[in-house]
Image (cartoon, helix red, strand yellow):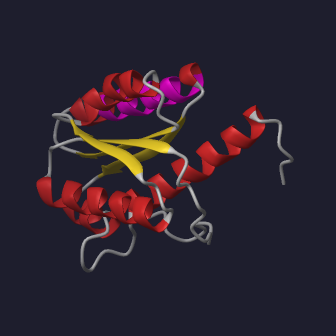
Amino acid sequence: MSGPGAPDTEPVDCHELRVAVVAASWHEQVMDGLVAGAQRALVEHRVGNSVLVRVPGSFELPVVASALATQGFDAVVALGVVIRGGTPHFEFVCRAATDGLSRVALDSGVAVGFGVLTCDTEEQALARCGVEGSQEDKGYQATAAALLTATTLRRIKRREPLG
């Protein structure tokens, strides 16, 4: 688990931002928790202009995130879960999602929130997805990180003081 060490930040006013959340569909209970966490973060950060787009799985997240990043969104939050099985499929999908989403952020200059759980078991995913009894809320955390990054990028573009 990656819980200890998470930054303790207060929600900031992000009402000017356009935000897209792209979420995979596999593992419905886990995904429902991640999406609920993302939506809670959007509300707490006062984002009034957001859209939720569903895709089949985590492998499809980067291509849709890339398309959204070119449509004027200030932040794109990618939510998914990959659970290890008995084949190399886990490594291929995890690498494709991670590398693809990193590339979207770097190529587009748009903040990308990484909310893709890569777990050995479904129990680990449930512990991290924000459902009742979870120890972590990665949907909320990924969204908050994307929003804070988007506000920083906006300040840089406007040549506002940083720090």
Q: Residue furthest bottom?
A: 133
Point out the image quarter for the C terminus.
Answer: bottom right
Residue at horizontal 43 percent and vertical 63 percent from the top: 41
Instruction: Give coordinates of residue 59: x percent, y percent.
Output: 27, 29
Nearest the eye: 92 or 72 = 72
Q: Main secondary structure of the magenta part?
A: helix
Residue at horizontal 83 percent and vertical 36 percent from the top: 159
Q: Is residue 30 above or below residue 87?
A: below
Q: Is residue 158 left or right of residue 75?
A: right
Point out the image quarter for the N terminus.
Answer: bottom left
Q: Is residue 60 magenta?
A: no
Q: Is residue 14 above or below residue 22?
A: below
Instruction: Give coordinates of residue 125: x percent, y percent.
Output: 27, 60
Magenta residues (range): 93-106
Q: Is residue 146 above or below residue 62?
A: below
Instruction: Give coordinates of residue 143: x percent, y percent.
Output: 45, 53
Q: Is residue 87 left or right of residue 125?
A: left
Residue at horizontal 22 percent and vertical 66 percent from the top: 123
Quarter of the figure with residue 89: top left
Number of callouts in the render?
0
Nearest the eye: 101 or 3 = 101
Residue at horizontal 74 percent and vertical 42 percent from the top: 155
Instruction: Give coordinates of residue 90: x percent, y percent.
Output: 26, 36
Q: Is residue 44 above or below residue 98?
A: below
Nearest the eye: 14 or 162 = 14
Nearest the eye: 8 or 12 = 12
